Image: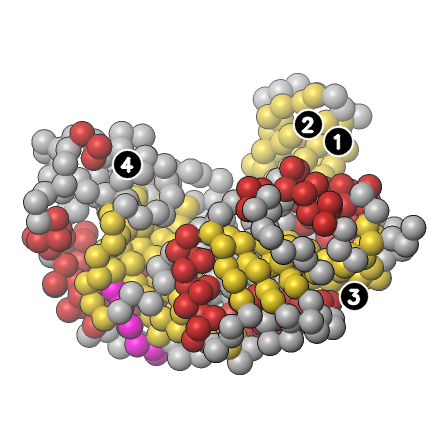
């Protein structure tokens, strides 16, 4: 087997999140995007130490379990909903098998409680980040999602099925407006251009919408320089209004026939060279800069950069399971680490003595504090900072710890600090089971055992899944 050669192979195994596996000439070959049972044509990209990586070129024969017809016109081009050729029940079984495989490799004698489905499998997402760009080099302006396997090319989204149709109407209206004005998009390589992203959020219950247009401060492409070399105009909003015709755009948005109601429209200036949605400055163009979401009887204020689970009804399923795993915490001090906007902390606050939430995003912490006041909870404290550093400064000792870290899991040094608290029980919530499995090895070596675990499908049609584990300290 040589690098660059093409082969026809049968995929025999599957690993999280979308890795097909086959054996070829004594090598274990991983093929991203290939499913078990498929016969595919691949090109070898690299090989080392008995392992190899292949690029999927063509599916020659589908798996017998692929019995569903794709329901989205963008399937195969968009890299998001890759499970559309599988019935939903089959998707759940595949995700459950992947998580079980990872946990069984590192845990023993635990109770597996299965996988819980999402209450909605279409139109479930409450937030989407769309990018401005082109579908091919020097092509017309596009507003959509990244093409499968590409960092640069986009596909024009017209009818995404995992969001409410209001998202599609707002997206199409926005693209039409800026395409007519020939506004250039921000190019990743040259760092020139204006239009960057369109971020839409929508509440599940009231269908209120928050629309955020993200642009750079480069308003004149003929003689502009990089933003950090070219100061903002004296009256920046007036300059953006003239260049982008914001009033005309707002007028078109507010006249759209929508299921819900546009509660606010914002303009965010982002001059970061990285392809991320962040804020150097935010202007409120219309309405208000927040929406309210309801979750398990509590009310949460969602701001443009607040972290909130993207599947609201699925989050209720997830947090009900978390509350069940936490159990009786009367008169106990709870640490909710990586707390986001404080959803879990406030869910536990009515029965706990005190809940301390720690989150690195200051805006999320401010929102959590406001939400606690909104829900009349006076036993919550939210601290802005890195968990690794904040743990050295907390005066309280926890009786119980809830962990809900980002995809990469917990920093090893922070994990050892947590272990030193010696709490009897903790709950770990993970959106990436490979990171969870890695951290569970450290926790078990320190004397903890996994009591029970389950998964919750928060992301139908995609390869992602949430997992919840209850751990307890082994008796000495």
* Snapshot quadrant of residue 164: bottom left
Q: Position of residue 372 (x, y in %)?
A: 47, 71
For the image shown, how many numbered marks are present on the structure?
4
- Mark positioned earlier in the residue sequence (4 or 2): 2
Distance from the alpha carbon under mark 3 to that under mark 2: 34 Å
- Mark positioned earlier in the residue sequence (3 or 2): 2
- Mark positioned earlier in the residue sequence (2 or 1): 1
Here the colouring is secondary structure
List the residue tagged with mark 1: 28
**Residues packed near mark 1 inside 10 Å, few (<14), some (14 to 19) or many (20 plus):** some
Rendered image: mark on residue 52: 2
Distance from the alpha carbon under mark 3 to that under mark 4: 47 Å
**Residues packed near mark 4 inside 10 Å, few (<14), some (14 to 19) or many (20 plus):** some
Element at label 2:
strand
Q: Nearer the viewer, mark 4 or mark 2?
A: 4
List the residue tagged with mark 4: 187
**Main secondary structure along the magenta-highlighted residues:** strand
Cβ atoms at labels 3 and 4 below 8 Å apart: no
Element at label 4:
loop
Q: Position of residue 15 (x, y in %)?
A: 70, 45
Distance from the alpha carbon under mark 4 to that under mark 2: 34 Å
Q: Nearer the viewer, mark 1 or mark 4?
A: 4
List the residue tagged with mark 3: 113
Element at label 3:
strand
């Amino acid at each position: 087997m040589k690098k660059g050669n093409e082969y026809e192979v049968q995929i025999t195994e599957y690993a999280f999140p979308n890795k097909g596996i086959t054996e070829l000439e004594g090598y274990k070959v991983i093929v991203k995007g290939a499913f078990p049972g498929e016969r595919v044509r691949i090109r070898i990209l690299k090989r080392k130490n008995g392992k190899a990586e292949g690029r999927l070129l063509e599916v020659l024969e589908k798996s017998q379990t692929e019995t569903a017809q794709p329901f989205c016109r963008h399937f195969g081009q968009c890299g998001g909903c890759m499970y559309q050729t599988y019935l939903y029940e089959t998707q759940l079984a595949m995700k459950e098998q992947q998580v079980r495989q990872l946990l069984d490799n590192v845990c023993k004698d635990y109770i597996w409680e299965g996988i819980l489905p999402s209450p909605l499998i279409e139109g479930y997402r409450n937030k989407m980040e769309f990018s401005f760009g082109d579908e091919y080099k020097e092509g017309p302006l596009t507003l959509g999602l990244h093409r499968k396997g590409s960092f640069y090319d986009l596909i024009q989204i017209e009818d995404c099925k995992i969001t409410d149709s209001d998202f599609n109407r707002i997206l199409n209206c926005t693209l039409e407006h800026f395409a007519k004005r020939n506004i250039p998009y921000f190019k990743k390589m040259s760092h020139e251009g204006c239009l960057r992203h369109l971020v839409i959020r929508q509440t599940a219950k009231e269908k209120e919408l928050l629309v955020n247009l993200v642009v750079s401060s480069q308003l004149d492409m003929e003689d502009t320089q990089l933003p950090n070399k070219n100061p903002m105009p004296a009256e920046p909003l007036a300059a953006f209004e003239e260049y982008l015709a914001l009033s005309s755009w707002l007028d078109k948005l507010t006249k759209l026939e929508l299921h819900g109601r546009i509660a606010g429209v914002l303009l965010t200036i982002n001059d970061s060279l990285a392809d991320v949605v962040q804020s150097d400055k935010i202007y409120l163009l219309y309405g208000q800069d927040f929406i309210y979401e309801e979750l398990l009887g509590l009310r949460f204020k969602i701001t443009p950069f607040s972290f909130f689970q993207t599947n609201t009804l699925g989050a209720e399923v997830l947090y009900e399971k978390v509350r069940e795993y936490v159990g009786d915490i009367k008169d106990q001090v709870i640490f909710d680490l990586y707390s986001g906007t404080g959803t879990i902390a406030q869910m536990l606050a009515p029965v706990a003595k005190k809940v301390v939430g720690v989150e690195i995003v200051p805006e999320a912490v401010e929102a959590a504090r406001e939400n606690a006041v909104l829900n009349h909870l006076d036993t919550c404290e939210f601290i802005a900072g890195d968990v690794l550093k904040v743990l050295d400064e907390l005066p309280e000792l926890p009786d119980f710890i809830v962990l809900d870290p980002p995809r990469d899991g917990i920093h090893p040094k922070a994990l050892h600090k947590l272990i030193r608290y010696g709490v009897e029980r903790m709950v770990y919530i993970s959106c990436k089971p490979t990171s969870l499995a890695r951290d569970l090895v450290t926790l078990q070596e320190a004397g903890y055992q996994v009591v029970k675990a389950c998964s919750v499908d928060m992301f139908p049609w995609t390869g992602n899944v949430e997992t919840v584990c209850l751990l307890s300290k082994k008796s000495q």
